[in-house]
Image (cartoon, rainbow, N blue to C red):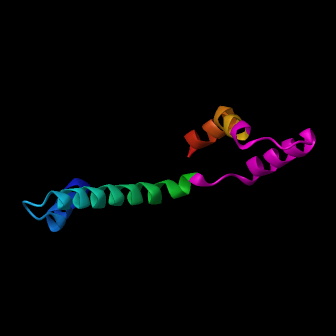
Amino acid sequence: MIGLALGILPPMFITYGNRSTYIIAALVVVMIICIICAILIIPAMCEDKELIDRIFRISKEEGKKESFYQMLKFGIREKIYIESKKNI
């Protein structure tokens, strides 16, 4: 169904014989796909209150601020984060 709906869009923007309209049509389709994906990912971006409190508690106990990249590595390796997303 989505493919049929998106298949209707390119002919609206394409003027045959004009190559630049093909680029515009492709950009419109890609933007629509990106917007749909962004809307669908919004519910997955929430964090539990318990996880937020735990991170704040750990950072207070250590007494130092970690860099963004260190926190990113910690978040990717954290097993609780991975398991909580499987349960959803």
Q: Is residue 76 left or right of residue 21?
A: right
Residue at the farthest bottom position: 12
The image quarter in which residue 75 lies: top right
Dominant secondary-structure state across the stretch colored magenta: helix
At x 74%, y 47%, the residue is: 51
Q: Is 14 colored magenta in this rendering?
A: no
The image quarter in which residue 81 lies: top right
Residue 53: image location, x then y, percent: 81, 50
The answer to whether one can see residue 1 in this image is no
Task: Looking at the picture, tell me which residue is in the foreground, 66 or 74.
Answer: 66
User: Which quadrant, please, contains the N terminus?
Assistant: bottom left
Task: Looking at the picture, tell me which residue is in the foreground, 70 or 22.
Answer: 22
Q: Is residue 3 above or below residue 72?
A: below
At x 18%, y 57%, the residue is: 22
At x 25%, y 61%, the residue is: 24
The answer to whether one can see residue 20 in this image is yes
The image quarter in which residue 59 lies: top right
Q: How many marks?
A: 0
Q: Is residue 62 left or right of residue 21?
A: right
Residue 54: image location, x then y, percent: 81, 45
Residue 65: image location, x then y, percent: 84, 44
Q: Is residue 43 left or right of residue 36?
A: right
Q: Is 58 colored magenta in this rendering?
A: yes
Q: Which residues are the magenta region?
A: 45-70
At x 54%, y 57%, the residue is: 43
Residue 34: image location, x then y, percent: 39, 55
Q: Is residue 51 above or below residue 70?
A: below
